[in-house]
Amino acid sequence: MRYGEVSIVLSAILMGTVAIFVRNTGGDALSITFLRLLFGFLVILPFCLKDIAPPDRILLALAFFNFTTIASYITAIQNVEVAMAALLLYMAPVYVVPISVLMGEKVETKTLLALPLGLAGLYLMLTPYAELTPGIIFGIVSGFSYALVFVLSKEARKKHSPFRINFYNLGLGSAALLPYFVLFGKVKSILWAVGLGIVPTAIPFLLFSYGMKYVKVQRAPILALIEPLCAGLVGYLYFGEVLTLNQLIGGAMILVGVLIAWRD
């Protein structure tokens, strides 16, 4: 059983549902980010109590870029279609591959096949947009930040458990946003916020951290490209968002790229 790959893909599927919870929770991006991190933190806290240790630089950097990814992605979701926000997030492989080379990983043949397919699919999905909007900009920021999350997660898993990693990922982010939420925060539904902290946060974050130990850093973001496909399906089924033929072809190309990356 290929536990690393399965964990990454299951994590991506669960994170593909995030837009349902974000839009039903309501509120501004920072308030929703705070509640996502807070409730995710509270869910995993009982399992972390025996595994707490002072954070090193890798854990602190990972917590920062994880926070940046979540906040910018939620902002993108609120300004563009769900599928588009997810696809911009998953420009991450573009940045991860050269970073992995600098880290000493040899670029695999399957990566050279899967990455161009995925990028071509992303291009087709992005063609309806002729200009940079705030949603597109925040989506691009989320993609670059997410690439660093992949790289730092791989490094963190050399010394830390998934529970310790996410204790700091979720705990530090929610602590940083607590003053803002107390002063300015507002949401429509706490119940949806609790769900946001569990389904597309606590569970997939743990799965992701576990899987990163066993998957090469250049392969992980390609496998995780399944998330924008799930997000597109959510946008279609739940929000009634319609994709063009080009975008559907692009989604199929992304799926083929994921399948190539999956194969031995």
Image (cartoon, rainbow, N blue to C red):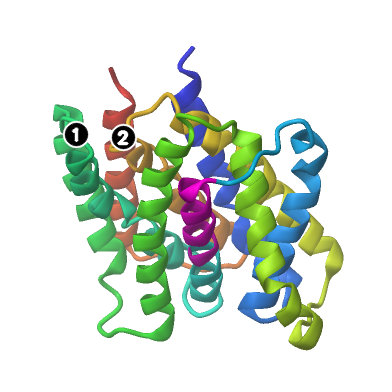
10 Å neighbourhood of mark 1: few (<14), some, or many (≥20)? Answer: few
Q: Which mark is residue 90?
A: none
10 Å neighbourhood of mark 2: few (<14), some, or many (≥20)? Answer: many
Which residue lies under the disc numbered 2?
Answer: 219
In the image, is 172 to the left or to the right of 58?
right
Which residue lies under the disc numbered 1?
Answer: 104
Q: Regarding mark 2 in the picture, which secondary structure is present there? A: loop
Quadrant hosting residue 74: bottom right
**Quadrant into which the C terminus falls:** top left
Q: Measured from the top left, where is residue 191 in percent x and y?
A: 85, 62
Residue at 17% x, 40% y: name it: 101
Give the vertical position of 76 relative to 1 (above or below): below
Residue at 47% x, 50% y: name it: 57
Q: Is residue 64 magenta?
A: yes
Give the vertical position of 68 relative to 156 (above or below): below
Give the vertical position of 263 relative to 257 (above or below): above
Q: Which span is picked out in magenta?
A: 56-68
In the image, is 3 to the left or to the right of 92?
right
In the image, is 143 to the left or to the right of 100?
right
Residue at 47% x, 38% y: name it: 156
Judged from this view, the residue extending furthest toward the top is 1
Which numbered mark, 1 or 2, is in the foreground of this view?
1
